[in-house]
Amino acid sequence: EAGVTQFPSHSVIEKGQTVTLRCDPISGHDNLYWYRRVMGKEIKFLLHFVKESKQDESGMPNNRFLAERTGGTYSTLKVQPAELEDSGVYFCASSRGQGWTKSYEQYFGPGTRLTVT
Amino acid sequence: AQKVTQAQTEISVVEKEDVTLDCVYETRDTTYYLFWYKQPPSGELVFLIRRNSFDEQNEISGRYSWNFQKSTSSFNFTITASQVVDSAVYFCALSSGSARQLTFGSGTQLTVLP
């Protein structure tokens, strides 16, 4: 089966611009997660979707970040307006739905490297 | 609160040496899951293993082995007879309670020299 894919792989934008990151989870995976790693820091959780619903968005840094998962398939993460401190690598992960024994195993995409100048 | 500590920032070994990557975790939950991920130079995070808190049995998969000890809150990862292709950043992670989110350690950069 195809893995988690993310687009674009790299994005360079100026401060104040808007960027939209896309994640396509593994087919059939109900759970979708966004994480990010800013320079020199740990990988941090942003939010968790179960199908199209936001299950946990406690990690979203502020209201400049908006995540959607229309139809419970792919997800987008929009940053508007982007700030310098938003630079980093944004990872998406997916896992099977609850009830599966492996529902805790998250499979990650290659990440999107965002550079805000 | 959850926390994962990987005290080793960088490790360098010569090919065929054994190497152990340390991971210490903190959680107040009695049910939790521990993970190891590998991040090769290409950037993606590759799932290696998941361990449940109620299963302390150690696991071996080829050259990889994992030692889970609840008494010391550790989940160490050993690579036997290391190879150059093992060079990567390795992350230990924790998921506990009802939350599904992963708490990551800061990662250990492993370099295997030929």
Image: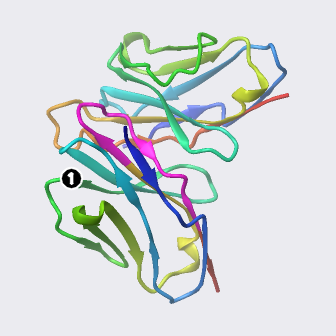
**Residue B58 is drawn in which quadrant?**
bottom left
**Image position of A39 (left or right of A100):** right
**Image position of B11 (left or right of B81):** right
Q: Is residue A22 above or below residue A44?
A: above
Q: Tell me if residue B97 is in the magenta stretch.
A: yes
Q: Is residue B43 above or below residue A11?
A: below
What's the residue at 73%, 28% (across, down)?
Answer: A85
**Residue A14 is drawn in which quadrant?**
top right
Q: Position of residue B39 (x, y in %)?
A: 54, 56
Q: Position of residue B101 (x, y in %)?
A: 37, 34
Q: Position of residue A113 (x, y in %)?
A: 68, 37
**Image position of B62 (left or right of A22):** left
**How is the structure coloured here?**
rainbow
Q: Quadrant of the N terminus of chain B?
A: top left
**SS at badge 1:** strand
Q: Tell me if residue B72 is in the magenta stretch.
A: no
Q: Is residue A12 above or below residue B110?
A: above
Q: Position of residue B61 (x, y in %)?
A: 30, 72
Q: Quadrant of the C terminus of chain B?
A: bottom right
- Category of crowding for the residue at label 1, using alpha-carbon neighbours closer than 10 angstroms: few (below 14), some (14–19), many (at least 20): some
> Could you tell me which chain the residue with mark 1 belongs to?
B
**Image position of B89 (left or right of B1):** right
Give the labeled residue for mark 1: B52
Query: Would residue B21 be visible to someone looking at this image?
Result: yes
Please name whichever residue, B92 or A107, is drawn nearer the observer in this view of the structure.
Answer: B92
Q: Is residue B3 above or below residue A47?
A: below
Across the whole image, how many numbered discs are drawn on residues? 1
Callout 1 amino acid? Asn
Query: Would residue A2 be visible to someone looking at this image?
Result: no
The residues colored magenta run B94-109
**Residue A87 is drawn in which quadrant?**
top right
